[in-house]
Amino acid sequence: MTDNKNSSIESSEMHSYSGTLSMNARGKLGLISAIALKDLTQIHGSGFIILLTLSILLFALIGFPFFIFANAATGFGGQLHLGGVWTATGIEGIFVGASDPNRIFLSTITLVHLALGYSIVVTMILIPAAFSIAYGQEIIKGTVRTLTCYPVGVFEITIAKLAYAAVISFIFGLPVFLLPTVVGLGKPVGDLFAIFLVAYFTTLLIVSVGAFVTNSITFVTKKMYIRPTLFANLLVIFSFLITSTILNSLNLFLTYVSPVFRALGELTPISLYHQGRLLLMFVFGGTESPNWLIFLLPVSLLVLGAWLTLKLWPDIYEKE
């Protein structure tokens, strides 16, 4: 019997597969770096405008009003410092009266919550946006098909797009976070930088997990039903919404759906943003500490997703 499989498809797949397996780590790194560098050198296009606009909006609508203007406002500035320590409490007097029932929740808010919350918002917008721009434009323009003519596969392309997002979001995000917080909080730059790094690496890990898990789903189903960019964005939003601070804040305004928030609160421990806050509270002298076992889940998903992505044929882009 003869094999009726299309020889052109077979040769294309075997070329990519053999290339992926035979190339050494240095060669793969060189290809990944070349793809990421191409994206960085071509950022002058629409990607630059989008990221710059997002950065300006984050600074102008959140960072500047809260950490600079509000800190200097009468009756607000002094209380933001909370005695000069990161883990001190007591900002509830800013928002509510002594008899307000919400005082109990707000009395637990510290400067760690405020600074980390802002850094999370900055990174959860800029990193997924940069990844979506880099990954999405390749598919829209069809240049992924050109890339797959070389000995690279979905694994290398995904890593390159994540590397690009990591570099460019750091360049845009760091000043957007530091400028208002340094002036508004008056805290050491080293402490603020540590807070930013926790949010930055947490968001980058979530986006990476989302991308590779999507590739794993594509490997199993043999078709890209959901793009890595979309699932990564959804995973970031979900991780943010199930933090205790966000759920409690929503409950202040939407008390009629409190049962829903309480149910979602059961998922709070699996949020990497929640564990990142506990880590910072511990480092800055608080009594709380993160559950290190929680980090095993995303790391395991990342390793499994990367392994399955190595087996994924690049012809999935032809099915888009």
Image (tube, grey):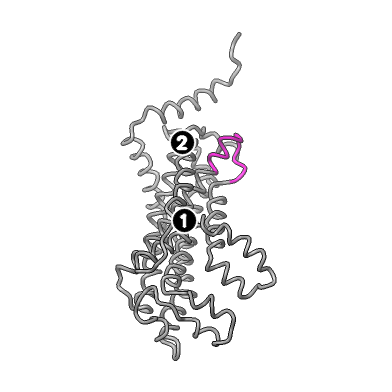
Residue at x 36%, y 48% (from the top left corner): 37
> Helix, strand, or loop for circle 1?
helix
**For residue 172, side relative to residue 2 (left or right):** left
**How crowded is the residue under tag 1: few (<14 C-alpha within 10 Å), some, or many (20+)?**
many
The part of the image, by quadrant, that contains residue 279 is: bottom left
Q: Quadrant of the C terminus?
A: top right
Residue at x 41%, y 59% (from the top left corner): 200
Q: Quadrant of the N terminus?
A: top right
Residue 155 position (above or below residue 279): above
1 and 2 marks in contact (CB < 8 Å):
no
183 and 229: which is toward the camera: 183
Confirm whether the magenta stretch covers residue 225.
yes
209 and 267: which is toward the camera: 267
The part of the image, by quadrant, that contains residue 254 is: bottom right
What segment is highlighted magenta in the picture?
214-226
Q: Label 2: which residue?
A: 307
**Mark 1 to mark 2 CA distance (whole Å):** 24 Å
Residue at x 53%, y 65% (from the top left corner): 244
Q: Label 1: which residue?
A: 130
Residue 267 position (above or below residue 145): below
Give the residue type that dot 1 points to.
Ala
Q: Position of residue 101 (x, y in %)?
A: 59, 81
**For residue 81, side relative to residue 245 (left or right):** left
**For residue 57, side relative to residue 285 (left or right):** right
